[in-house]
Image (tube, rainbow, N blue to C red):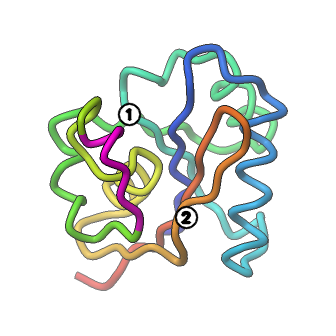
Amino acid sequence: MMVAGFGCRKGASLDDLTEAFLLAVAHCGVDRAEIEALATPAEKQGEPALKALAAELLLPLIPVEADILPEASARTLSHSDRVVALKGVPSVAETAALAAAGPNSRLLAPKVSSRSATCAIAIGGAS
């Protein structure tokens, strides 16, 4: 399973989320049709732009509970001291993608950023 994970500011725009998604797809060298789901921390699942992007892409939006995100921390490629202080993980987008893609998942590249959103793509691994 290939998952695009997102972190975003409250009220992030659809344009910013779309830009982060398209940058991540290009950065990872994958076709956007290969993405099977979007993921974000459960606290962000109600963000209108995230819901709109999932609807536009015809993909499910997987909410990842905050207590599950740290389990993926060791597999991240990016680290933000600010995000660790605020969220307890090195990268929200990366941990959301990894957690949603499964326990043996890996990132295809470090997260990318737009003005108010980050996006990372993870692929599930064999059990």
Task: Provide residue 17's location: percent of width, then percent of height.
Answer: 72, 38
Real-space Cα distance between discs 1 and 2?
Answer: 15 Å
Q: What residue type is labelled 2?
A: Ile
Name the residue nearer the viewer: 29 or 74.
74
* Residue drawn at (52%, 59%) of the image: 3
Please state the horizontal and vertical placement of residue 18, each as a whole percent of the image.
79, 42
Q: Nearer the viewer, residue 115 or 106?
A: 115
Q: Residue 16 appears in which quarter of the rendering?
A: top right
Badge number at residue 122: none
Q: Which mark is on residue 121? A: 2
Secondary structure at badge 2 equals strand
Q: Is residue 63 above or below residue 108?
A: above
- Callout 1: SS: strand
Please check the rendered image and state whether residue 110 is part of the magenta-colored stretch, yes or no.
no
Q: Which of marks 1 and 2 is nearer the N terminus?
A: 1
Residue type at tag 1 = Pro
Which quadrant of the structure image shows residue 107?
Answer: bottom left
Q: Could you tell me residue 58's position as x and y percent?
A: 74, 42
Name the residue that disc number 1 marks. 41
Q: Residue at x 59, y 52 (%)?
A: 119
Instruction: Please tell me whether residue 42 is drawn above or below residue 5 in the rendered image.
Output: above
Q: Using a 10 Å C-alpha cutoff, classify the residue at mark 2 as few (fewer than 14 neighbours), some (14 to 19) or many (20 or more).
A: many
Q: Are marks 1 and 2 in contact (CB under 8 Å)?
A: no
Residues shaded magenta: 78-84
